[in-house]
Image: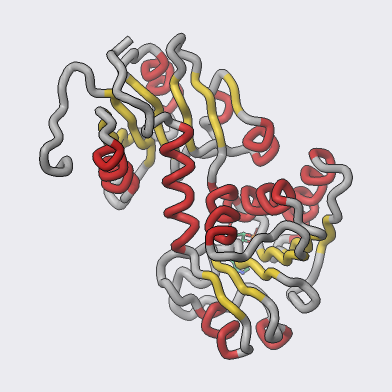
Amino acid sequence: ALPPGREISGLTRVFGILADPIHHVKTPQMLNALMAREGRDGVMVPFQVSSEDLPTLVAGLKRMKSLGGFVVTVPHKTAIVDLCDEVSDSARRIGAVNTVRREADGRLVGEMLDGKGFVGGLVAAGIDPKGRSAYLAGAGGAANAIAFALVERGVSRLTLANRTRAKAEDLAQRLAEAYPAAAVEIGTSDPSGHDIVVNGTSLGLKDGDPLPLDASRLSPGQIVAEVIMQPEETAILAAAKAAGCRTHPGKPMLACQLDLMADFLGMRALPEAVR
Ligand code: ATR
């Protein structure tokens, strides 16, 4: 339901979220509430679409003049890249897009905000990665976005560690091509010697998952950050606390990312007529 006092008219700007499955997404509630607070005449609705139908749907959305844009999530973040007319340099390098704006002329402009949301959440908590060393476990979708965002923020050096080493090497290579001056290396499960330690794997989502890194090597003074939002305290965060580290949960990434999405999609602008 829309927040009280809001109704949809012929002037309402439409935003979508593309996913499959889609029943669990929370972004519409949060961005609809944000648009209500901002006095923006817009609405976000779920667009469930299969991978097979994605190109057809996106071609149609390009032609939909009342569309402001859409959020893209699992499993479409990679496939959407080539369906956009333009994507940011970092989204192109990461190979994924999670937010697409529709310009007045119908062009679809893609951006990847996962990593920027993560770094923004850290900065908002008073932990600026700029000039600090970082250790990142993982080399999947989330870790790729975070690695680029950490380097773009200016970490002094970045160590990547992943179960499948080849994926970490591939990520390091793409980082080096994009940022030749960045100090990126491949590490082991030992996170010692780094200011900020990040779990960018999916380990911790499920009860009984192994730890994503060797927690016995953590020490006070290190900050351990998580990408997983649920559970709020993953096993690695609990182990980090026990080791005397400062911890940073996955949740703040979400709030920051919603703000970035709202900015990118123009959800804070004044209402405008359907073009
Ligand atoms: P996401 O979108 O959450 O990043 P993903 O792209 O599937 O999901 O990436 C999952 C990450 O968690 C990968 O880094 C993966 O390691 P591999 O590249 O070796 O697959 C890591 N991961 C998942 N399960 C793991 C496990 N049991 N042990 C170690 N790493 C694991």
Question: Residue 62 falls in which quadrant of the image?
Answer: top left
- Give me the residue at 63% from left, 89% from top: 243
Above or below, 223 relative to 94: below
Question: Whole-percent x and y of residue 87?
Answer: 60, 27
Nearest the viewer among 206 and 251 is 251
Q: On the rendered image, what quadrant is the C terminus found in?
A: top left
- Give me the residue at 57% from left, 61% from top: 122
Q: Is residue 204 left or right of residue 221?
A: left
Question: Whole-percent x and y of residue 43?
Answer: 26, 32
Question: Whole-percent x and y of residue 146?
Answer: 63, 53
Nearest the viewer among 164 and 184 is 184
Question: Whole-percent x and y of residue 166?
Answer: 77, 55
Which quadrant of the figure shows ligand 1?
A: bottom right
Above or below, 51 relative to 186: above
- Identify the colour scheme used: secondary structure
Q: Is residue 52 left or right of residue 117?
A: left
Above or below, 267 relative to 210: above
> What is the number of callouts on the image?
0
